[in-house]
Amino acid sequence: MLSIDDVEKDFEAVTSSAARLSKVWPDSGWPAGLTLRQNLVDLGWHEKEFQNRNSFAYTMVAPDESTVLGCVYFYPTDKAEYDAEVFLWVRDNEVAIELDEKLFEVVQRWLASDWPFENPAYPGRTISWEHWDALPVK
């Protein structure tokens, strides 16, 4: 679970990967202007949402837990054709970038085997943002 305990490592990963993250959420502007304090607020929100079982955010760390390599997010959706929105990113460095496709494959298998979703969406990954934005809502 992504939590406030991850704030410094997460902040470093996010701010060093801003260009990469702008492709994950292209219209959000995030993480431009992110401060450590704001990141703490964001992680507190993710942690509370997880506890309430409203959405789920996970951090991926190096085996020795010294570095955040990326994150995975499962959100509810209002899109009629889907039952969840899934986003993931890896930090912008050679080691983690090699993990991107592996992480995506693992997340897809994990959702299929352990989660109750029948049709999760991967906006910006398997669905273009243009198509995603045009989908009807429930």
Image (cartoon, grey):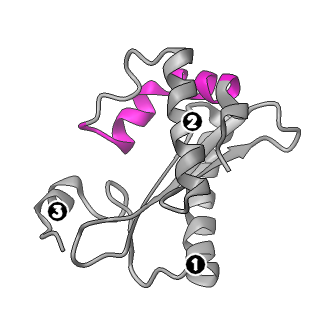
| Outermost residue toward the right in this view | 64
Q: Position of residue 78 (x, y in %)?
A: 25, 66
Compute the Cα span from label 3 to label 1.
25 Å
Q: Check the image and report above or below for 38 versus 121.
A: above
Give the mark toward the camera: 2 or 1: 2
> Which badge, 3 or 1, comes first in the chain's sequence?
1
Q: Position of residue 56 (x, y in %)?
A: 55, 57
Q: Nearer the viewer, residue 5 or 9?
A: 5
Residue corresponding to mark 2: 43
Picture residue at 32% right of the left edge, 54% below the top: 124
- The answer to whether residue 19 is left or right of residue 129 is right
* Amino acid under disc 1: Trp
- The answer to whether residue 5 is left or right of residue 75 is right
Indicate the secondary structure of the residue bearing disc 2.
helix
Residue corresponding to mark 3: 131
What secondary structure is the magenta-colored segment mainly?
helix
Within 10 Å of disc 3 (Cα), the crowding (few <14, some 14-19, many 20+) is: few
> Which badge, 2 or 3, comes first in the chain's sequence?
2
Residue 104 painted magenta: no
Within 10 Å of disc 1 (Cα), the crowding (few <14, some 14-19, many 20+) is: few
Picture residue at 54% right of the left edge, 44% below the top: 46
Q: Quadrant of residue 30?
A: top left
Q: Nearer the viewer, residue 125 or 15?
A: 15
> Which badge, 2 or 1, comes first in the chain's sequence?
2
Give the mark toward the camera: 2 or 3: 2
Indicate the secondary structure of the residue bearing disc 3.
helix
Q: Position of residue 17 (x, y in %)?
A: 51, 27
* Amino acid under disc 2: Leu
Q: Check the image and report above or below for 63 versus 41.
A: below
Highlighted magenta segment, given as a residue range: 8-27
Compute the Cα span from label 2 to label 3.
29 Å
Q: Check the image and report above or below for 2 versus 122.
A: above
